[in-house]
Amino acid sequence: MPMSIKGLFPIDNWDFKSESVLADLPVEDFELLTANKVDKIYKKGEIIFWEGSHPSGIFYITKGKVKKYKLDKDGREQIIYVANTGELLGYHAILSEDRYPDSAAVLEESKITFIPKTDFLHTLQRSEVLSRRLLKTLSHEFAVLANSLSLFAQKSVRQRLALQLIVMREKYKVNFQSGMPVEINMSRDDLANLVGTARENVVRFLSEFKEDKILETKGRKIIVHDVSKLIKIADYR
């Protein structure tokens, strides 16, 4: 049974891939960008920035995972995206000279590097490589978010949960080899906010997936055993 999803599911349609933005930047550009960087360890659940606040810089996830989310009028979270190690946060607001369009909080203990706004903008002016990559990343992120919106309009909760489990499985892979199960370490509340449904619906469908031997749970951890069955349930075209 294939456990790598290449050829089975278009994962690139669901992942921002901004980790390539700073990879192998020319040395002088990287040094300029990180001249005044500040590293900070965030504890699980800690807020990096709030929706509506003014940006003072960008954030690079050195290690960990971050949820980007908005609050509805009743104070419920809608998770827009889960960012992974190596991804950049907060640069949209600086480029658009606007406030943060969403909030960001860490899902697990994370090391986040803060880069001041002036250094980011100065490097962007000087570095063709960085500006080209950011433009490419922005257009890709737009496509990913457009996919997410169409998903909410067209798919059932069961299909959305299956699809988000496929995407989260990719993000939680560590030293992955074919055939290995992958542990997703995410609270049921966060998973429900990502799927856009009530917690009890997530719990009910997870139980169903467990009965079908697609996955198992250990506390808050979800261990995916059969990703090909999730792909069938998601029915993604």
Image (spheres, rainbow, N blue to C red):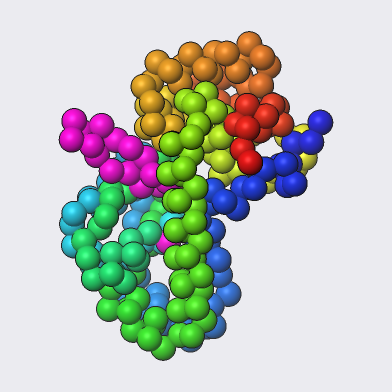
Where residue 96 appears, as percent x and y from the top left, is 28, 69
Q: Is residue 25 above or below residue 126?
A: above
Q: Is residue 224 left or right of residue 63?
A: right
In the rendered image, residue 68 lying in the magenta stretch gets the answer: yes
Q: Is residue 212 above or below residue 182?
A: above
Residue 172 visible in this rendered orientation of the protein? no
Name the residue: 39% across, 82% down: 123
Q: Nearer the viewer, residue 210 or 73?
A: 73
**Which quarter of the rendered picture does the N terminus lie within?**
top right
Name the residue: 35% across, 66% down: 91
How many numbered marks are there? 0
Where residue 169 appears, as percent x and y from the top left, is 59, 37
Name the residue: 21% across, 61% down: 99
Residue at the front extreme, as displayed:
154
Where residue 237 appears, as percent x and y from the top left, is 63, 41
Residue at the right extreme, as displayed:
1
Q: Is residue 35 left or right of residue 132?
A: left
In the rendered image, residue 49 lying in the magenta stretch gets the answer: no
Q: Nearer the viewer, residue 231 or 126?
A: 231
Q: Is residue 140 above or below residue 4?
A: below
Residue 56 visible in this rendered orientation of the protein? yes
Q: Quadrant of residue 58?
A: bottom left
Q: Is residue 75 left or right of residue 155?
A: left
Q: Which residues are magenta?
A: 65-88
Where residue 63 appears, as percent x and y from the top left, is 48, 52
Q: Is residue 86 above or below residue 173?
A: below
